[in-house]
Amino acid sequence: MGIVEIIGLAGSISLLSGWRIYLCTFAVGLAMRTGWLSLPNHISGLDVLANPWVLGISAIGLIAEFFADKLPWLDSIWDTVHTLIRPVGGALLAMAIVDAQDPAWQVVSLLLGGGAALLSHSAKAGTRAAVNTSPEPFSNIALSTGEDVATGGLLALALTNPATAIVIAGVLLLVVVATLLLLHRLVKRLLRPPPPRSG
């Protein structure tokens, strides 16, 4: 696997970790343990994810996140708690994928993976905070389910076909940046003082 595929795979998984860290950890570990997905030979650094303890804990986190994400008030609390966990997890996954002997590459992958996961987490948490203000629960459930499906599908595609991983990472990055810009404009509009009334 070439450096472009490695960077694409690390970027894809890091960005997806900002949405669903437990799903990413569990899916990669399960794929390695069972051989369901033909993972590239290069990512042997992820072998630890196939450990039964890691699989068990990530499965519990996956189930908890699945249900917590569907309840608006609990979702906001869950996202706040995971503001630290998701970027750290994304950074460690990226570092394990790059698996470079050069310490400089390890630091670069750690920083870029953590930054990517933090960006996607911020976009997710900001979007969900806006949706969670809606009095009806259906929009929150629909958005959460969409995130579940998108994360699982894109993760499987990136793992089984690393050549597409760079495209996935690029598209995800564009979506995340566009979402953050829209959220920024929304917040600015909400915080703008009302125009003074004449007369």
Image (tube, helix red, strand yellow):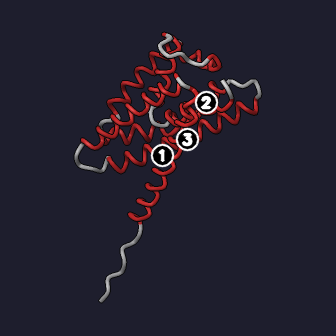
Q: CA distance from mark 1 to mark 2?
A: 20 Å
**Is 107 or 15 nearer to us in this picture?**
15
Q: Residue at x 35, y 29 (%)?
A: 66
Whichever of labels 1 and 3 marks the residue nearer the N terminus, that label is: 3
- Residue on which the image places disc 3: 170
Q: Quadrant of residue 146?
A: top left
Q: Residue at x 55, y 41 (%)?
A: 170
Mark 1: which secondary structure?
Answer: helix
Mark on residue 94? 2
**Is 100 or 196 nearer to us in this picture?**
100
Q: In front of the other: label 1 or label 2?
A: 1
Q: Are marks 2 and 3 in contact (CB under 8 Å)?
A: no
Q: Residue at x 76, y 33 (%)?
A: 104
Q: CA distance from mark 1 to mark 3?
A: 9 Å
Q: CA distance from mark 2 to mark 3?
A: 15 Å
Mark 2: which secondary structure?
Answer: helix
Whichever of labels 1 and 2 marks the residue nearer the N terminus, that label is: 2
In the rendered image, the residue lying farthest to the left is: 136
Q: In the rendering, at what x and y percent does residue 22 appear?
A: 46, 26
Q: Are marks 1 and 3 in contact (CB under 8 Å)?
A: no
Q: In the rendering, at what x and y percent does residue 118 appear?
A: 54, 41
Circle 3 packing at 10 Å, graded few (<14), some (14-19), many (20+), is some
Whichever of labels 2 and 3 marks the residue nearer the N terminus, that label is: 2
